[in-house]
Image (tube, rainbow, N blue to C red):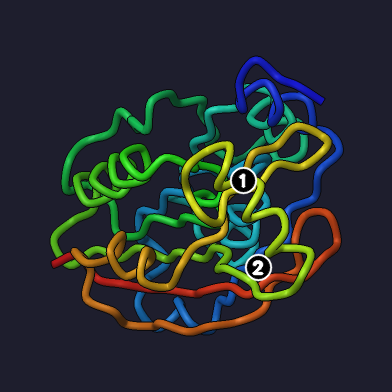
Amino acid sequence: MHFTSQTDYWNSVAKSKEFTTNLNYGLISPFIKQESNIVDYGCGYGRTLNEFHEKGFNNLTGFDYAAEMISSGKKRFPFLNLKVCQDNKMGILSDSTDLVLLFAVLTCIIDDEKQQELMDEIQRVLKPGGLIYLNDFLLNDDERNLNRYEIGFEKHGTYGVFELTEGAILRHHDPLRMKELTKNFIPVVDEKTIFKTMNGHTSKGIIFIGRKR
């Protein structure tokens, strides 16, 4: 299926997709307080922010570029502050945020420059010593993935990019690429893991918590 933009794709699945990279609250809880200002960039319908809300956090803001995702989130969790954003800009003050969540967002951005632009924006909004909690997908070595990485490389010029028949264009990352993207953060947690994907497969993944330098 072809979409004019990836935003159109994510709008089309806003009511049907259930996202799967999970919050490990035990990893992040030692570093935050109930009054912490938490931002979820690429929040989708707000599932992760709702987990924080259930644990007593109230200073929560979510951003997503798919308006239908935000609309779906407002219906599911009307008490959350969810906003549409564009061009990797959050429109909030510099040095204002204690924690930014980035859950399976880089996989949706296949361009190196756009990925770095987002990481720079996160760096901007975080307070000195503020934290990023990132999880995302790494390259896999099974035949199914290797085949689609080769096809994606021929079409898009970046190894790890692949297309789903339903219209999504996604990216799995070399661990060295993740180190490059997180170089301005002091690692607090840096773990490899296995995630379930939104379509029910499994993928190698990373959980990274880092403190703004």
Helix, strand or loop under label 2: loop
Please identify the quadrant where the C terminus is shown. bottom left
Residue 153 screen position, x and y as percent: 55, 47
Residue 158 screen position, x and y as percent: 47, 48
Give the residue pinned by disc 1. Answer: 152
Question: Which residue occupies 64% across, 39% down?
Answer: 169
Query: Which disc, if any, is residue 53?
Result: none
> What's the amino acid at mark 1?
Gly
Instruction: Mark 2: give few (<14), some (14-19) or many (20+) Cα within 10 Å.
Output: some
Give the mark, 1 or 2, whose residue is nearer the N terminus: 2
- Judge left or right: residue 167 versus residue 87: right
- Judge left or right: residue 185 versus residue 138: left
Query: Which disc, if any, is residue 22?
Result: 2
> Of 67 and 92, which appears nearest the observer?
67
Instruction: In the rendered view, tell whether residue 29 sits above or below residue 148.
Output: below
- Judge left or right: residue 192 versus residue 18: left
In front: label 1 or label 2: 1
Instruction: In the rendered view, tell whether residue 54 sits above or below residue 43.
Output: below
- Residue 146, located in which quarter of the rendered image? bottom right
Helix, strand or loop under label 1: helix
Question: Which residue occupies 81% across, 43% down?
Answer: 17
- Residue 200, located in which quarter of the rendered image? bottom right
Instruction: In the rendered view, tell whether residue 3 sits above or below residue 17.
Output: above
Farthest residue in the top direction? Answer: 4
